[in-house]
Image: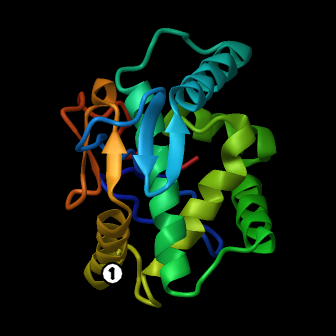
Amino acid sequence: MIRTSSVRRPLAVLGVAVAAAALSACGTAPARQGAAAVVGTDRISIAQVEARVAAVRDGAAASGAATEEQPGLARHAVSDLILGKLIAQALADRQLGVSQAEVDRARTADAKTLGGEAKLTELLRAKQGVPAGDVDGFYRQQIGLVKLAGGQDPNGDAGDAAIRKALVDAGTALHVEVNPRYGSWDTARIGLTDSTEDWLPKTVRTL
């Protein structure tokens, strides 16, 4: 089963989960010109966000799915790009990392469970807003979250608390700025504020 929540809480599927979360979105201070967000010294450009949104739309068109704009798609892209940087920082702070071999194992296991790589890619595109070219990035984040749980069940209270603390600490240290067009980043909530209602469902049926 693939699930979503306000903060990603990975579910184990054959060892690692296709879990999901659409963080509600945003940032605190005006971001630098041309940037969608600035995380520490790293700049997330508006062009990056627009390219990600376009890739999701293109994937929908290629699959024959409806192409109407999904509310919050751009904010979700910004939030996800920020989250990736926070996870990377939190892992680095703990001298942890995610290897390509770990990503490959998790991706292969979930593809097998879902009936093939094409089905996995389409499900992540449709339900998580993940472009086909960033599936590895999605798994890198999910595995990173499992590691940040510090050996606790990432779906349990202790594991969730450990993940949240790690991401809040990383966000505080890096100081996230977001372009006002996307909202503002709430470090404590680990997400954007002033955003529309989540466009992702809270649960997705088991396939």
Answer above or below: position of 93 versus 26. Answer: below
Q: What residue type is labelled 1?
A: Ala
Residue 52 placement, left or right of 6: right
**Percent coordinates x, y for residue 21 in the rendering:** 41, 50
Question: Residue 12, how many percent across, how many down?
Answer: 54, 71
Quarter of image, res 78: top left
Residue 45 % position (x, y): 54, 33
Q: Would you name the residue on which mark 1 appears?
A: 162
Q: Nearer the viewer, residue 151 or 112?
A: 151
| As drawn, 98 above or below 26 | below
Q: In which quarter of the image is residue 13?
A: bottom right
On the question of residue 147 being in view, the answer is: no
Say which residue appears at 47% left-offset and 46% top-offset.
80
Q: Residue at 45% across / 62% down in the picture?
A: 86
* Residue drawn at 41 percent across, 43 percent down: 79
Q: Is residue 43 above or below residue 181?
A: below
> How many discs mark residues in the rendered view?
1
| Residue 96 seen in the current view | yes
Quick one: label 1, few (<14), some, or many (20+) residues within 10 Å?
many
- The location of residue 200, given as percent across then percent down, is 38, 36
Residue found at the very far bottom of the displayed protein: 151
Residue drawn 30% across the image and 71% down it: 164
| Residue 185 in the figure: left or right of residue 96 | left
Q: In this view, does 121 lie to the left or right of 23?
A: right
- Mark 1 residue element: helix
